[in-house]
Amino acid sequence: MLVSPIATTATEIVLPGKVEPSGLDVRVRELPAPAEGQVVLRMDATGVSFAEQQMRRGKYYDQPPFPFVPGYDVVGTVTATGSQDDAALIGRRFAAVTKVGGWASHLLVDAADLVPVPDEVDAVSAETVVVNGITAWQMLHRIAKVRSGATIVVLGANGGVGSTLVQLARHAGVKVIGTASARHHPYVRDLGATPVDYRDPDMYRRIREIAPDGVDAVFDHVGGPGLRESWGLLRRGGTLVSYGTAATKNEDGNSQLPVLRSVAQLALWNHLPNGKNAHFYNFWAGKRRLEAFRGRLREDLTQVLRLLADGALTPQIAARFPLAEASAALALAESRTVAGKVVIVSDPN
């Protein structure tokens, strides 16, 4: 039974192909009525992640064919449901990971993918820790299993995932060395990390000076040739977590090849008799067991949102733009001049 038969008009930002940020299109369409188990979510906040920056170049590992609506995650309010059983969801605010589709005024989401947002957390703040928070939490606690007193390296400590990872690590009693450009070093210090300039050709030597006995974990979103340097920073028993291939984002060619190369290299390192561990973090790993995947996601995001509500995490908001200015939001995120996450909010009525 459809709870709300009123048609919903959605404004969507469309990525039509390999275009510059200014080449995004806008379309308006009527959403289909939500099916059983679906809801209509009014977007209150979405964001620009590194995934969208890769997608517009056709470089994200398993992106859909053009054209499509980008938007990896969203925070919004349920306005309609596909069944009477879900009617209590209407008017409540939730977060969801969508992978695509978030850059829209309204969208259809499976009710099982919704994670409640605490009342004391506003939509923009919550948006900064949806995919970023889940990624950081799972890498730190589920994969590397870093303990209090450990020392880790976070590449790109000023970014969306990086800044969240630094905060989660510091909350857990972990010492953090974070790389960023020199202009972002005060920001990285404020997060609680020791900054190192990623543009310094001696960056890895500098990290070794700070941690001469090696580090317990390295979180590397860059990939490419530098992955070997990250591996070399680890002490015996340490863990390298690779979660991106930013070094190759501007290269032409197959979008899957850089990831496959990284995965192969990490697998080889895992067979070396040095006690180190290497992992490639895939957000969507385990989705074939959908209920278990959803359960982990819900559990981890709930933990992160609670830390945000309690003040243990501070939302890192680089800037906010209305949906109509999504092109400007994407351009700013790609400029590498900001710290934190660029957030897109619903257009004013």
Image (spheres, grey):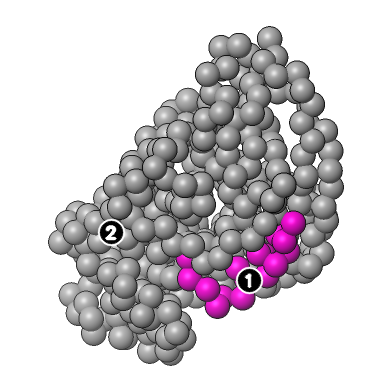
Which quarter of the rendered picture does the N terminus lie within? top right
Query: On the rendered structure, is 5 left or right of 343?
Result: right
- Residue 22, position in %: x, y? 79, 67
Is residue 338 one of those drawn in magenta? Answer: yes
Query: On the rendered structure, is 185 left or right of 169?
Result: right
- Cβ–Cβ below 8 Å for labels 1 and 2? no
- Residue 109, position in %: x, y? 63, 31
The magenta region covers 324-340
What residue is disc 1 on?
332
Query: On the rendered structure, is 222 left or right of 13?
Result: left
Label 2 environment density (alpha carbons within 10 Å; few <14, some 14–19, many ≥20): many
Relative depth, front residue between 267 and 247: 247
- Image point (22%, 62%), residue name: 174
Residue 189: quadrant of the picture: bottom left
Q: Amino acid at mark 2?
A: Ala
Query: On the rendered structure, is 103 left or right of 153?
Result: right
- Residue 116, position in %: x, y? 45, 33
Is the stretch drawn in magenta largely helix, strand or loop? helix
Q: CA distance from mark 1 to mark 2?
A: 27 Å
* Residue 344: assigned label: none
What residue is disc 2 on?
169
- Residue 321, position in %: x, y? 64, 61
- Image point (58%, 39%), residue name: 76
Q: Reply above or below: 206 against 282.
A: below
**Is residue 159 shown to the viewer in this render?**
yes
Q: Reply above or below: 114 against 256.
A: above
